[in-house]
Amino acid sequence: MNDIEIKNIVNNTDLKHIAIIMDGNRRWAKLQNLPSAFGHKKGVESLKATLRACNDFGIKYLTVYAFSTENWNRKQEEVDFLMNLVAITLSNELDEMHKENVQIHFIGDLSRLTDPLQKILANAVETTKNNSGVVLQIALNYGSRNEILQAVKNIVDSGIKSQDITEDLISDNLYTKGIPDPDLLVRTGGEQRISNYLLWQVAYSEILVKDEFWPEFGKSLLADCIQEFGKRQRRYGK
């Protein structure tokens, strides 16, 4: 299918938001007999290609799982590399993303990140806050259970009575406040689990698992996912 045909599927299905679990960087690198770092670097290229494809296809929101609260348990060398990669990528790519009208958000507990990295993230958000193109949400030090726990604590601390707590109120206290829930959740790398990602938000999302590793992902595979989404019948429990 060409871009116009994919855009027609997006419009006809009202597909606004795609969330992705970007899995398989290390496994891809291992198959290439390369260090994990090469897989992560190639994964950045896949993200850039996917972001541009979202713009081409008319997808308004893209949320990607970059670093989970559990990823701190990896080897310190890899954690340091990933944090540096985030900093370098944002520093190098921000001007281009700004020119392409991308609006950048971060979701997760950013307080654990270093002060220099927090400043880089804050600058990216501030620089792009008035852009009207694709909204890119990057989940960084993110865990959905922790997100929901913090939302509950915020509600309790605000003095709201239990009988006044609603689903909308909980949604408004999540990191994703103001962003519609994902219509489609894609996981690369073949694993069939959600991995503590957007548990509240994907309650009625269509889920699609791709065997390809994240470094192999791009415009063509995103188009395949959208085609598959177009065949689904969303019932929302009805």
Image: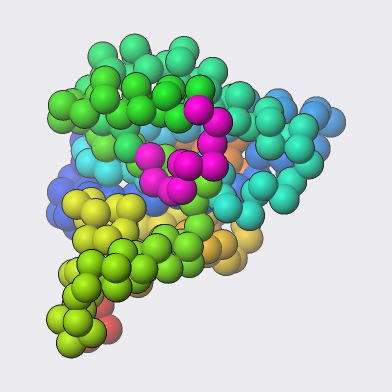
Q: Is residue 163 above or below residue 197?
A: below
The residue segment tinted magenta is 106-115
Q: How is the image coloured?
A: rainbow
Tell which of 202 and 217 is nearer to you: 202
Q: Residue at x 67, y 47 (%)?
A: 72
Q: Residue at x 72, y 40 (%)?
A: 26
Report x, y in % for residue 27.
Answer: 74, 43
Magenta segment: does it hold 51?
Answer: no
Q: Quadrant of residue 119?
A: top left
Which quadrant: the N terminus? top left
Magenta segment: does it hold 112?
Answer: yes
The number of numbered discs placed on residues in the rendered structure image is 0
Q: Can residue 134 be seen?
A: yes
Report x, y in % for residue 21.
Answer: 51, 51
Q: Residue at x 23, y 67 (%)?
A: 158
Report x, y in % for residue 61.
Answer: 27, 43
Q: Is residue 41 above or below residue 62?
A: above
Residue lying at the far right of the rendered structure:
33
The answer to whether 46 appears left or right of 229 in the picture is right
Q: Is residue 8 above or below residue 147?
A: above
Q: Can residue 231 be seen?
A: no
Q: Quadrant of residue 37?
A: top right
Q: Residue at x 74, y 46 (%)?
A: 74
Q: Quadrant of residue 84?
A: top right
Q: Is residue 56 above or below residue 187?
A: above
Report x, y in % for residue 49.
Answer: 43, 28
